Amino acid sequence: MKVNLMTITTGAIMSYGIISLLTGQIHWGVLGGILVMVGGAKWIRLAKRKENDEIEYDERVNNIIKQLSFRFLSISNLLLLIYLLISAQIFNELVVQANYLSIYISIMFVITFYIIPIIARNK
């Protein structure tokens, strides 16, 4: 079976459904779906690299990717810190559960390590 975007999406939806039904909690299903999507994207990227003998990017492109990734992580972590400080100091209660924070951090890592390099290389 050839792995493409459709099979990865189908696998992510199936894993989301199965994990959500087994655990009874939606956030674990979301986490499972994200893991399948990230693993599938990595698999496709490695397969394309083998097929095309993709040329390595020069140091300038790699520096741009590092800068964009660092800026995105810094901004996302700053927003999270601001939220946590405001909710703890002003409202005296934390509304967000730790499970939602782990999903937020997972999404930030996916964006930082997969989406930003794709955008930077296509510029």
Image (spheres, helix red, strand yellow):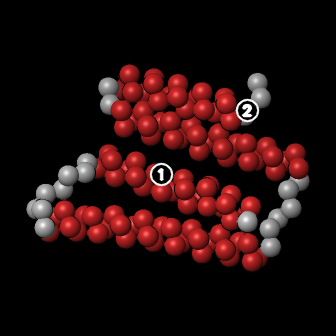
The part of the image, by quadrant, that contains residue 65 is bottom right
* Mark-to-mark CA distance, 1 and 2: 23 Å
The residue under the point 43% across, 27% down is 19
Whole-percent x, y for residue 49 in the image: 81, 50
Crowding at mark 2 (Cα within 10 Å: few <14, some 14-19, many 20+): few
The outermost residue toward the left is 92
| Residue 15 versus residue 55 in the image, above or below | above
The residue under the point 31% across, 68% down is 81
Whole-percent x, y for residue 57 in the image: 80, 68
Amino acid under label 1?
Ile
For residue 11, side relative to residue 54 (left or right): left
For residue 114, side relative to residue 31 (left or right): right
Q: Element under label 2? A: loop
Q: Quadrant of the C terminus?
A: bottom right
Whole-percent x, y for residue 37 in the image: 58, 40
Q: Which mark is residue 65?
A: none
Q: Element under label 1? A: helix
Whole-percent x, y for residue 76 in the image: 42, 65
Of 99 and 61, the residue lying toward us: 61
Q: Which residue is mark 2?
A: 3
First reached walking from the N terminus: tag 1 or tag 2: 2
Crowding at mark 1 (Cα within 10 Å: few <14, some 14-19, many 20+): few
Amino acid under label 2?
Val
| Residue 74 versus residue 17 in the image, above or below | below
Q: Which residue is mark 1?
A: 107
For residue 59, side relative to residue 16 (left or right): right
Q: Quadrant of the N terminus?
A: top right
The residue under the point 53% across, 72% down is 70
The part of the image, by quadrant, that contains residue 43 is top right
